[in-house]
Amino acid sequence: DDKDDGDPQTVLVLNDFPYCFADDIQHWVLWKHRGGDVTTEDIANAQRELEQRLTTTATMTTTEANPEPDTAAEKNDTTNNENNKNKADSNNNNNNKNNHRTGDGSGAVVEFLHWVNPPHLQSLPDIDHVHILAHTNHP
């Protein structure tokens, strides 16, 4: 029996094979399983989810991400680690071109763009899906 019972399920994920875009653009795919075609409501919900995910993570303060050390030894370790990190960051600056693919909060979303590929270009034509680009204000 080919009938697929169950509630429709949408899944929003970073594209495993993103197209080549600028660093401040994230390429997501909204998949819909067991529920027909992706609707405009599904897309609007996905965009709200992305905006919340990306903005919430991006607005976390440095203090929340890196609390102050308690002891002099910890402060010394922190200074050494920061110096090493800064050196590594400057050395690897050109190697981090895919940071936008992580989905870890690149910044507030500036705008969205979405589209559906024609059937002959779809990787999985039996599962409806929509490409969504999120343009953020930080690379």
Image: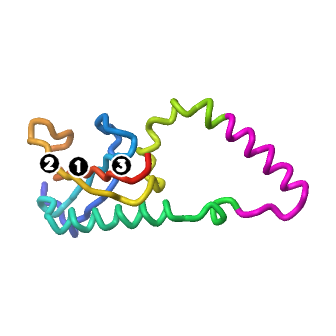
Q: Residue 31 or 52: which is nearer the viewer?
A: 52
Q: Earlier in the sequence, mark 1 or mark 2?
A: 2
State whether residue 68 is above or below residue 137.
Answer: below
Q: Nearer the viewer, residue 58 or 127?
A: 58
How packed mark 2 is, by other alpha carbons closer than 10 Å (few <14, some 14-19, many 20 or more), is: some
Tell me which residue sits at (16%, 63%) in the image: 35
Which residue range is magenta in the image?
Answer: 67-87
Residue at 75%, 41% (x, y): give it: 83
Q: Residue at x 32, y 51 (%)?
A: 135
Left or right: 62, with 128 as reference point: right
Q: How far is disc 1 from disc 2 in space, using C-alphas?
A: 6 Å
Q: Which mark is residue 14?
A: 3
The reply to whether dot 1 and dot 2 touch (C-beta < 8 Å) is yes
Q: Secondary structure at mark 2?
A: loop
Is 99 left, or right, of 75 in this rendering? left
Q: Position of residue 36 (x, y in %)?
A: 12, 60
Quadrant placement of the N terminus:
bottom left
- Crowd tier of the residue under label 1, counting other residues whose Cα lies within 10 Å: few below 14, some 14–19, many 20 or above: many
Q: Is residue 70 magenta?
A: yes
Residue 94 on image: x %, y %: 51, 30
x, y percentage for residue 17?
Answer: 32, 37
Q: Amino acid at mark 1?
A: His
The vertical placement of 108 against 29, above or below, is below
Provide the secondary structure element on which disc 3 rests. Answer: strand
- What's the distance in space between the residues labelled 3 and 2, CA to CA? 16 Å
Residue beneath label 2, please?
116
Residue 49: x and y in percent read 34, 66
Tag 2 or tag 3, which sits nearer the N-term? 3
Q: Mark 1 — residue?
A: 131
In this view, 28 is above or below 22? below
